[in-house]
Structures are given as C-alpha cells and as structure tokens.
Image (spheres, grey):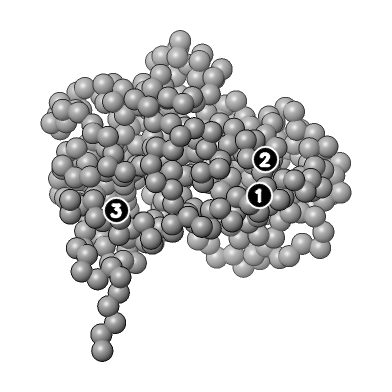
Amino acid sequence: MILRLPTEGLPVVRVLFSFIPGISHLFPLVPLAWAFRAAGHEVLVAFGEHTEIAARTGLHIVDVAPGYDGMAVLEKALEDNPKLAEEWWASTLTDDPTPWAVFFAALNRPLVAGTMDLVDRWRPDLVVYEQSATVGLMAAARCGVPAVQRNLGIVRTGGLHEAVARCLPDLCDTYGIDSVRQPAVTVEHLPPSMLPQEPEGWFMREIPFNGGAILGERLPAPADGPRIAITMGSVRPGGFYGYYGIEQLTRLVGEAGKVNAEFLLALGDVDLAPLGELPPNVRPIGWTPLDALLRTCTAVVHHGGPGTTMTAIEAGIPQLLALDPLDQGNETTGPAVAKRGIGIVTTQEEVDASMLERLLTDQDLRIATREVRAEVAELPSPADVVPRLIALTTG
C-alpha cells in the first residue's frame, strides 16, 4: 500500500525569494522557504552583502550584487536628497511609505541587474519577496509569474512599489518592465490582534528563525533568578550598534545595574569597551540565536525589530522596546506592541530602572503576551500555506 501525502499530485515549482540585503529581512522568511523545500520544490534566494551568513540557512544563495554595502547606499541616498534626509531622521514610516520611495529605490537599484539576469537563466514559477524589495516584483513582472509579498511589521504598502519603479525608469526600460503588478498575495507578519490597520492579505504563523550556530558554551542555561536579555538587532554583523556606536547603550546598561536581575548582552561580537566597566549583574554573551536565548529569559529589551518582537512572543515573555531615532525600522512594531499591551515602548534616552522592574513584575504584560502567543499558534503554519501559494502558479 502506498501512502499518498496531501501535497502529492501538485507540480514541482521553482520559487525565487528576493530581499534587500539585511539579515533581519531574510531570517523571517527562512521557515517558509524551507516549507517549500520540504514539500519538494526548488528554492533559490537572491541576496547580497551578507551572503555567507545567508548560506548558513542551508538554502541556495545567489549573490546578485557583489560588493553591496547597504549602509553606504543609504548614506549616499541621504546625501543626495538633503530635504528628504531631514524628514528621514525626524519622522517614522507611516501607513504609506511612498514618500520614502527614493530611498527604497536606492537600496533596490544595485540588486536589479543581477536579479534580472538570474530570473532569465533560472525561470522561476513564483517569486516571494519581502515588503521593501521592489526588485522582487520587478523580477515577477520580467518573467510573467505571480508574486507573493511578505510584510514587515505594521507598515502598509500603499503605492510604494509603483513609486520605487518610477525612480528606476532606466532599469525598467532596460528590462522591459512596463509596470509592477500588485502581488497575487500578501502575507502579514503580525497576528490580527496586533495590527492597528486593516490587513493587506493572509495571516501565517510566525516560526522564529534566528540563524543556526554551534552553541557549545553559549547554550543558554536555565536562570536561577530573573533574567533579561538585551539585543539590538542584526542589521549588520555585530548588530546595528556595530555601525553607529555601542556607546549609545551606556544609559541602558547603567539603569540595568540598578535592577535585581541578571542582564545578558546579546549584541554580537562587537567591542564593548566604549561602555566602560559593566555592572556586576550585566554580562556579554556574544552572538546567540534569540529563540534559544529568550526561552531562558524573563523578559527582553530590544530595538523594536519585527523578528525580535515575534521571537519574544514565541518565548512567552514581555518586552521593552528601546527605540533609536537613527533606526527607521524601529517603528514597524512599536505601535502594535503598545496597542496589544505585550510590552513597554519608549526611547533609549528614557529607559530607566523602574521600566526594567516593571518588565519583571507587571502581570498584565505577561497575560497579554500569553494570549498573543496562543493566537499565533492557531494561525496556518508555513507548511499549511505552501499548497495555497503553489496553486497560484496553476491558475
């Protein structure tokens, strides 16, 4: 007797995943990519800059922009657009990020030629891209296949992709792209109760992926008492502060020293010397996958990244978002965390010991987090979503 699997009979398709170069953009989609692979489909990832880290996901990576430097690209865009640069530092992404199209166009431009060459050679049947990667929509238009967008936090798409394409007329002409279509499907990142606005598409269960590692001595052991992790994202190796300066965390570390709890600095392998002598209850642990770390913690302090937010929910712990005005991505989940009551949202300049104490004692935060965790667990898993996405290629 032959056991017939639910996916048997579906065509084997080629799925291209497209991102702007940023590990924090790649990692949230790794479980979906592996769900395609586990169902027997071919998967290729168009990426840049951090390709060695990307390859550790076990997926096949194509470097479509050798030498890409995301921070240099952004700085040049800000330099070339001084008026918009003033607003960039003073404002946050809104319901419609179209006003920032020139910056997103700058981030996408170096990726286009390599991605178009890739789709011409590989001919995907489906393109999955994250919300800021207009290049993914361009790739789908180039080869005439459906596209699937994965959103980032609460930011709505609005007219972003059309505006980005208008900023890249030379490339659209070169590759015969008359217009970028709307995606066939949009997949939300946050669960329904956390979205302040109407959803743009489907909901899917978030399966936190923070990278593989040989943990060894870094394997987090259960804590003897209250433990709070401090992490500031993975925009670059060593985190965001590997670029902007670790000294910005001086106040946070000082306030942590006033709290009766163990604090673990999961900031990557950056030089912590600018922080001076650390309080006795604060210790660095280098780079450690957050999903493994947070399951041993009582709470977490972080920069507001969507991936970290969802990893904290999966671990069932409250969170404090210490936002930094230099990081435009920090508002992608802040309002959602505050709306749902699963954490404290503040700025690095305003963090104090009383807020850190509240993370340990406020039962309302803990109850709300458990409710959202249960809500996420009820959503369709990536494996559940794959057959529905494959059906887009046969319509």
The amino acid on which the numbered mark 3 sits, given as a three-letter code, is Leu
Q: Position of residue 59 (x, y in %)?
A: 35, 59
Q: Is 257 displayed left or right of 135 in the figure? A: right
Residue at point 82%, 37% (across, down): 353
Q: Which residue is disc 2 drawn over? A: 341
Q: Which residue is disc 1 drawn over? A: 369
Res 340 seen here: yes
Residue at point 82%, 59% (across, down): 225
Seen in the picture, residue 242 relative to 266 is either above or below; the reply is above
The amino acid on which the numbered mark 2 sits, given as a three-letter code, is Gly
Q: Which residue is disc 3 drawn over? A: 389
* Residue at mark 1 to residue at mark 2: CA–CA distance: 8 Å
> Going from the N terminus, do you reach mark 1 or mark 3 first?
1
Residue at point 50%, 19% (across, down): 88
Task: Name the residue nearer the viewer: 249 or 154.
Answer: 154
Q: Of helix, strand and loop, which one carries label 3?
A: helix
Q: How crowded is the residue under tag 1: few (<14 C-alpha within 10 Å), some, or many (20+)?
A: many
Badge 2 vs badge 3, beta-carbon distance below 8 Å: no
